[in-house]
Amino acid sequence: MEEAVLKIRHLKKYFPIRTGFFRKTTGYVKSVDDVSFDIGQNEIMGLVGESGCGKTTTGRTILRLMEKTEGEVLYNNKDIFSLGKNELRKLRPEIQMIFQDPYSSLNPRMTVGEIVGEALLDHNLCKKEEVNKRVEEMITACGLSSYHMRRFPHEFSGGQRQRIGIARSLILNPKFIVADEPVSALDVSVQAQVINLLVELQKKKGFACLFISHDLSVVQHICQKIGVMYLGSMVEMAGNEGLFKNPLHPYTKALLSAVPIPDPTLKRNRIILKGDIPSPANPPSGCKFHTRCNYATERCSKEVPEYREITKGHFVACHLC
Ligand code: SF4
């Protein structure tokens, strides 16, 4: 097996809760709480879970868009958090992000040509006279036309704006991308086009990708490996087939039961979870999922289940497995 391009080891990201006149720290919101996984070269790994489970914070911390609390993020065996400002700047073109909201992530005062070409100039990756040619090639590869380079973001539809966002990330030839809910702000009719474009470009350019989504059918379509997060922790991780054919964790089973089947004659037994997702500032004791789990026992509220490998490449954190 090829060596992983990215290794996350016991990553934690806590946000302090400050109260009172002196802004004293009275607790922490544990957004990412001891998460570990690898992403191989050319691999697309999905990260799923409900809103507020820590997916986006995980993606942003990996790219060092925010500082970690603890743990390591090894990119080609080098800890991203050990890099100085200049070293990190040199690495930036190799590690990129595609944002969820294509509109707010594009500068409304710049033309598409300027937006997509800006990073090339910023990182001195090509001569000034070659920028237009490189931008034109990239936006054409992303399904836009060369005349779009002179237009501004507000002149485009949501799907086209996301294509611009993809072009801006990929023009730097990154080796690793975090795609944070890249299609959730788009109409269903254009989601498939953007997803297929991303998959096509990934095959052509061969980058590794962490694909963050709450849409399990999209993740099933494009990801080779999937991690399921709940309240900042990874509860299950497996290859595509392992997770969708043999989910082990009760939370994964509940999420999968909500995925619609594109066949009106088939019916899925929906598993309804009890209550709301608890606050990550005050997570339940033992297994964090025990307040909503249909199989919870007394042990579950007292003992944290070990996250362990059940079969090759299939990890789960549950006392029942
Ligand atoms: Fe449910 Fe207990 Fe397993 Fe947690 S450890 S998922 S509460 S059965």
Image (cartoon, grey):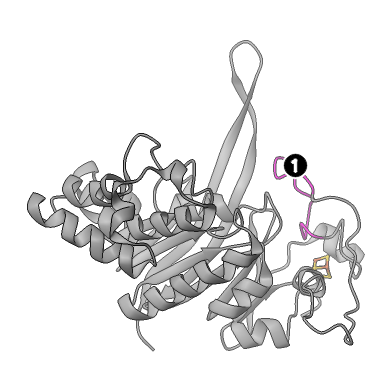
Residue at (79%, 60%) from the top-left corner? 289
User: Is label 1 within 8 A of ligand 1 (CB to nearest ligand atom)?
Assistant: no
> What is the count of numbered marks?
1
The quarter of the rendering in which ligand 1 is drawn is bottom right
| Magenta-colored stretch includes residue 279 | yes
267 with respect to 90 (left or right): right
Q: Position of residue 111 (x, y in %)?
A: 31, 43
Q: Is the magenta stretch mostly helix, strand or loop?
A: loop
List the single residue furthest toward the front. Answer: 147
Q: Position of residue 249 (x, y in %)?
A: 76, 74
Residue at (24%, 49%) from the top-left corner? 119
Q: Which amino acid does label 1 sit on?
A: Asn
Q: How crowded is mark 1: few (under 14 residues within 10 Å), some or many (20 or more)?
A: few
Residue at (87%, 56%) from the top-left corner? 291
In terms of depth relative to the viewer, which is nearer, 283 or 124?
Answer: 124
Q: Where is residue 283 in the image (x, y as percent from the top left)?
A: 75, 47
List the single residue furthest toward the top. Answer: 21
Please say whether residue 7 is visible from this viewpoint.
yes
Per the image, label 1 sits on a secondary structure element best described as: loop
Image quadrant where one finds the C terminus: bottom right
163 with respect to 19 (left or right): left
Identify the residue under disc 1: 282
Q: Position of residue 221 (x, y in %)?
A: 59, 79
Q: What stretch is highlighted in magenta?
A: 278-289
Please say whether residue 105 is visible from this viewpoint.
no
Residue at (13%, 50%) from the top-left corner? 124
In terms of depth relative to the viewer, which is nearer, 257 or 7?
Answer: 257
| Magenta-colored stretch includes residue 61 | no
Image quadrant where one finds the N terminus: bottom left
In terms of depth relative to the viewer, which is nearer, 79 or 150?
Answer: 150
118 with respect to 56 (left or right): left
